[in-house]
Image: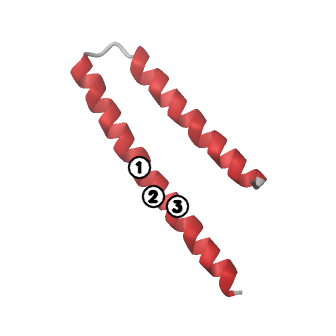
């Protein structure tokens, strides 16, 4: 694995862990907490998709050179 990939993966894992810890410690009802988890998961999915798309475009650009 490349160094950048490891750093990026570590950043993502750290962010997810922080979000999970924050949601679990927050003084909210179960319904509100589940809503927050659903919203955050959706946002993370969109961000991951964008990052994946950018990486695929970079790979295609590198192969065409």
Seen at 38% across and 16% down, the residue is 26
Left or right relative to 4: residue 45: left
* Quadrant housing residue 34: top left
* Label 3 crowd (10 A; few <14 / some 14-19 / many >=20): few
Q: Which residue has dot 2 on it?
A: 49
Q: Is residue 22 above or below residue 51?
A: above
Instruction: Give the residue at mark 3.
Output: 52
Indicate the position of residue 38 as horizontal and vertical percent values.
31, 36
x and y, in percent, of residue 39 in the image:
31, 39
Q: Are marks 1 and 2 in contact (CB under 8 Å)?
A: yes
As drawn, which residue projects farthest toward the left? 31
The Cα–Cα distance between marks 3 and 2, rounded to whole angstroms, is 5 Å
Question: Would you say 39 lies left or right of 14 here?
Answer: left
Element type at marker 1? helix
Between the residue at mark 1 and the residue at mark 2, the CA separation in whole angstroms equals 6 Å
Give how far across and how far down residue 16 sits, in percent: 51, 34
- Compared with residue 57, is residue 44 higher up or lower down, i.e. above or below? above
Mark 3 and 2 residues: CB-CB less than 8 Å, in contact? yes
Residue under numbered circle 1? 45
**Number of dots carrying numbers:** 3
The 10 Å Cα crowd at callout 1, few under 14, some 14 to 19, many 20 or more, is: few
Residue at the (55%, 66%) spot, across then down: 54
Tag of residue 54: none
Q: Earlier in the sequence, mark 3 or mark 1?
A: 1
Per the image, label 3 sits on a secondary structure element best described as helix
Residue 13 location in percent, x, y? 58, 37
Q: CA distance from mark 3 to mark 1?
A: 10 Å
Corner quadrant of residue 11: top right
Q: What colour scheme has been applied to the protein in the rendered image?
A: secondary structure
Residue at the extreme right of the image, as rendered: 3
Residue, x 45% and y 22% (percent of image)? Answer: 22
Which residue is farthest front? 1
């Amino acid at each position: 694995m490349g160094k950048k990939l490891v750093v990026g993966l570590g950043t993502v894992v750290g962010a997810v862990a922080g979000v999970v810890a924050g949601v679990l410690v927050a003084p909210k009802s179960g319904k509100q907490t589940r809503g927050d988890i659903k919203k955050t998961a959706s946002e993370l999915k969109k961000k991951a998709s964008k990052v994946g798309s950018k990486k695929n475009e970079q790979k295609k650009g590198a192969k065409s050179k």
